[in-house]
Image: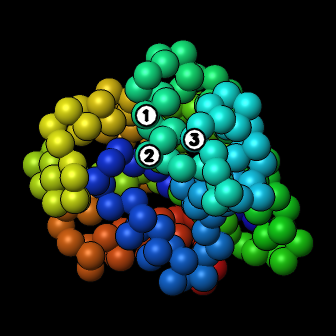
Amino acid sequence: MIRLALTGSIGMGKSTTAQMFARRGVAVWDADDAVHRLYGPQGTGAAAIAMLAPAAVGPDGVDRAKLREAILADATLLPRIEALIHPLVAEDRDAFHKEEEIKGSAVTLCDIPLLFEIGAQDDFDHVVVVSASAEVQRARVFARQGMTEAAFEAILAKQIPDAEKRARADFVIDTAAGLEAAERQVDAVLQAIGASDA
């Protein structure tokens, strides 16, 4: 089974690209979805956060708005949360891979926004970076409701620069030229790894 990792900075078109792989029969795991599950009412992540920020957890699991408030109020909180949540997310990803191996899947793809930042790239056979020009990225990000210059800068500060991601990638999918061009690049990746009929 070939394990692909998909990553890219905010506004690059990562989720759309992951869907393109899924439409070609590739089993896709999404880190953000895993966090949502972990933060749910019965999630192990919610139980972990309740120990660190009890006010941010209620009957429906983690209240993200309250959690953001708690993180803003205490600079030491985010690294402590990450130390608890990242291993749980990694466990969820491992369970996904085991399940797909049992099913006999030829290729899996894990959508991990902070792949390089958490040092998970070595867990995969190939890394695919989704990219676009800074102008396209900015236009996409500011089309999102509630996005501010300060929030955008804060997000970028936590992410490795796009140029470095591109340099470290096995494959780069440039989404600036539109969906059809991106689809062709997805096909080219699958062909290159010998999985064009995943």
* Closest to the observer, 50 or 194: 50
Q: Assess whether mark 1 and mark 3 are in contact (beta carbons under 8 angstroms).
A: yes
Residue 167, how many percent across, how many down?
38, 36
Amino acid carrying label 3: it is: Ala
Q: CA distance from mark 1 to mark 2?
A: 6 Å
* Closest to the observer, 167 or 71: 71
Amino acid carrying label 2: it is: Ala
Residue bearing the label numbered 3: 56
Residue 60, how many percent across, how many down?
64, 60
Residue bearing the label numbered 2: 65
Residue bearing the label numbered 1: 69
- In what quadrant of the picture does the N terminus appear? bottom right
Q: In the structure shown, which secondary structural element does the residue marked by tag 3 occupy?
A: helix
Q: CA distance from mark 2 to mark 3?
A: 8 Å
Residue 86, how many percent across, how many down?
67, 37
Question: Compared with residue 120, is residue 1 higher up or lower down, i.e. above or below?
Answer: below
Q: CA distance from mark 3 to mark 1?
A: 9 Å
Tell me the residue at 64%/51% (across/down): 58
Q: In the structure shown, which secondary structural element does the residue marked by tag 2 occupy?
A: helix
Amino acid carrying label 1: it is: Glu
Name the image quarter holding residue 174: bottom left
Question: Compared with residue 72, is residue 13 higher up or lower down, i.e. above or below?
Answer: below
* Closest to the observer, 107 or 40: 40
Q: In the structure shown, which secondary structural element does the residue marked by tag 1 occupy?
A: helix
